[in-house]
Image (tube, helix red, strand yellow):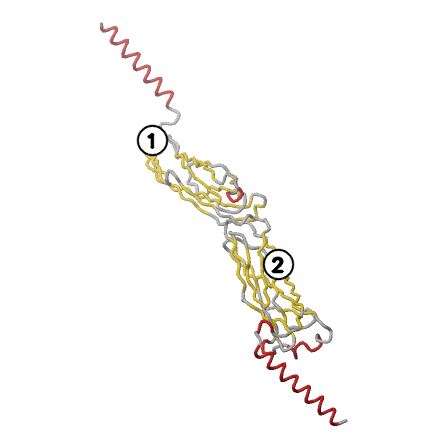
Amino acid sequence: MNRNFRSLKTIFIMGLLMMSLFTIFMPSSSAGFIKLTPNMIISYDESAANQVITPLETTLHIPIYVQFQVSGPLVILPNIPEYLDSSTGGVSIDLTVESCPSFCSASMSTSSVIAPITQNLNLATNASLIVTVNENAPGFDDFTVRVKAKSKQVNGLLVNVPPLETVHDVRVKPSYAALISIEEPKGNFMEIGPMDTADFEIRLENLGNAPTEVTFELINIPDGWNPNIQETVTLGSGVMGEDSSKTVTLRIKPPYGFGYHNERKTLQVKVIPSYYRNPTLEGREYVLNFTVQSRGFSTPGFEGAMFLIALASVIGFMSYKKRKK
């Protein structure tokens, strides 16, 4: 009985030694003749992905969750850690951004995570998707960022876990970016007579990612001066292929009381862009300055009388010349 037990023990030890030598000298890629089947699932925090992301202003940090498990012969599964190389501490999973739109910049907060190797789905966290967008991101239109997870092969004495690759789309929705450019083609200074009108052009271009309504407000108007500008104008979105520029005219009429004038005043126009469907979504406020120099004589209400006097003078002079002949 004891002799049989010693023989079995010797055979078992010799078998382990041969298996160890076999494992040492064979290629690592083929180590472990029992293959376990990996399974990997990627998900993300939808509440974080649904947060407002404003072009050129905000950055989203979206937690990414990776779950990993293996399946295989039932006799092996309860002792998986014993059959695998314990130095790994689990399976290493590389995380990368596979694709995103041209207006988006996306990266992972970490390049890899470690997940335990068991027959149950285990969660590997500590990874976030970092997303920003520029002004070309269409306002309120969803887009996706594709995240790829790739597990590395894990080898053991008797078993191995082959690599596995999977992808998942993270859906993000950018908000409205109220961006406009303003030009003054004719400048912001003009010299006119007191009976004339100064016409200033204001050229607007929508650089944002949705149609924009621009509101104009006249401020700091000097006494006696009479400026005029339309209240609002709507600019299309160039991102959506619409006409994104328009020109409006600011008209300023100086005081024209009787007599000589030499007045120089500056008037201001407040420009406020906002989303055309929701005025509460405002962008940066601009204040434009326009200066007018009013110089010359003014004879308001006397134009007709002066014409009659001049006409009477001409007629009288011609009559006088005729009588003299």
Of 1 and 262, nearer the camera is 1
Q: Secondary structure at mark 2?
A: strand
Mark 1 touching mark 2, by CB under 8 A? no
Q: Secondary structure at mark 1?
A: strand
Position of 123 compared to 107: left or right? right
- At a point 59% along the width and 49% down the height, the residue shown is 141
Gap between marks 1 and 2, in whole Å? Answer: 79 Å
Q: Residues within 10 Å of mark 1 (few under 14, many from 20)?
A: few
Position of 229 compared to 174: left or right? left
The label on residue 42 is none
Q: Position of residue 102 (x, y in %)?
A: 51, 52
Q: Which residue is mark 2?
A: 168
- At a point 69% along the width and 78% down the height, the residue shown is 79
Q: Amino acid at mark 1?
A: Gly
Q: Amino acid at mark 2?
A: His
Of 179 and 8, nearer the camera is 8
Q: Position of residue 211 (x, y in %)?
A: 54, 43
The label on residue 259 is 1
Rendered-image quadrant of the N terminus: bottom right
Q: Position of residue 11 (x, y in %)?
A: 68, 87
The residue furthest right is 1
Of 227 and 137, nearer the camera is 137
Rendered-image quadrant of the C terminus: top left
Relative to residue 212, is residue 97 depicted above or below? below
Q: Position of residue 200 (x, y in %)?
A: 40, 37
State the image quarter where residue 304 is shown. Answer: top left
